[in-house]
Amino acid sequence: MTVELRNLFVFFLLTIVVSCSPDSSTTGDNERELIGTDYSDIKSTQARDIFASGMEAVNTRNYQKALTYFRKSNNIEPNNGTILNSIANAEAKLGMNDEAFSHFEKAIQADSSYLIAYASYGTYLGEQGRYSDAIHILKTGLSKSTERQFDHYVLCFNLAVYYYKMDDCQNAKHFVKIALENGFNDDRFNSETNEINEVIQENCP
């Protein structure tokens, strides 16, 4: 393929903000609806407040400051998938690859049903050109998801991207088709998915 597909990840989950359908009937039991400042799976109020300060730092792209807050939050509430995933993403942005790898693994171990961690981890691996590893992690997450979860389609979106980058048109088309069939009315996700689909259809035989 001559056309390079830019590494799109609609909800780069460093921000831990997933916009889901407001219709609760479409929400799976394991789905994390982390909208705005709702970090409901962080049980400690103190840890949650510190985590929120880290998210404010992320919004200004001050990843070192964000990492400091996330680590403080982790000290108060260790072994929390959301916090560990955020530490890993901040470390990845700062080029701390060994540390990021370790914390992504710990995030998944802390909560194997936390789909955002698989999406984040897969994206991290894909950004390093480790497409096979990225696909493995994303498919592991996908196997734990259901069609009633928005993250299911985010994982399919990323699988389409990395299969395309591996010149596997059949799987790229397969997963982007699933992503397009999501029942969630998220304009940004739909726009980015349509863009990826156009690239794949134009450049895959």
Image (cartoon, helix red, strand yellow):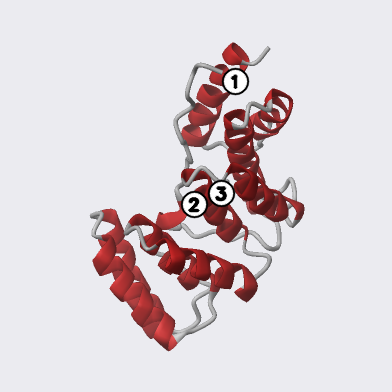
Q: Image quadrant for the C terminus?
A: top right
Dot 2 amino acid type: Tyr
Q: Which of the labelled discs sits on residue 124, or is there none?
A: 2
Is 108 positioned to the left or the right of 148 in the image?
Answer: left
Return the disc, 3 or 1, that comes first in the chain's sequence. 3
- Percent position of residue 193, x then y: 55, 29
Q: Which numbered disc, 3 or 1, marks the residue closer to the eye?
A: 1
Compute the Cα span from label 3 to label 1: 31 Å
Q: Which of the labelled discs sits on residue 200, or is there none?
A: 1
Looking at the picture, tell me which residue is in the foreground, 71 or 99.
99
Return the disc, 2 or 1, that comes first in the chain's sequence. 2
Residue hosting label 3: 22
In the picture, residue 158 is in which quadrant?
Answer: top right
Compute the Cα span from label 2 to label 3: 29 Å
| Whether residue 12 is visible | yes
Dot 1 amino acid type: Ile
SS class, disc 2: helix
Dot 3 amino acid type: Pro
Q: Which of the labelled discs sits on residue 30, or is there none?
A: none
In the picture, residue 111 is in which quadrant?
Answer: bottom right
- Percent position of residue 162, x then y: 59, 36
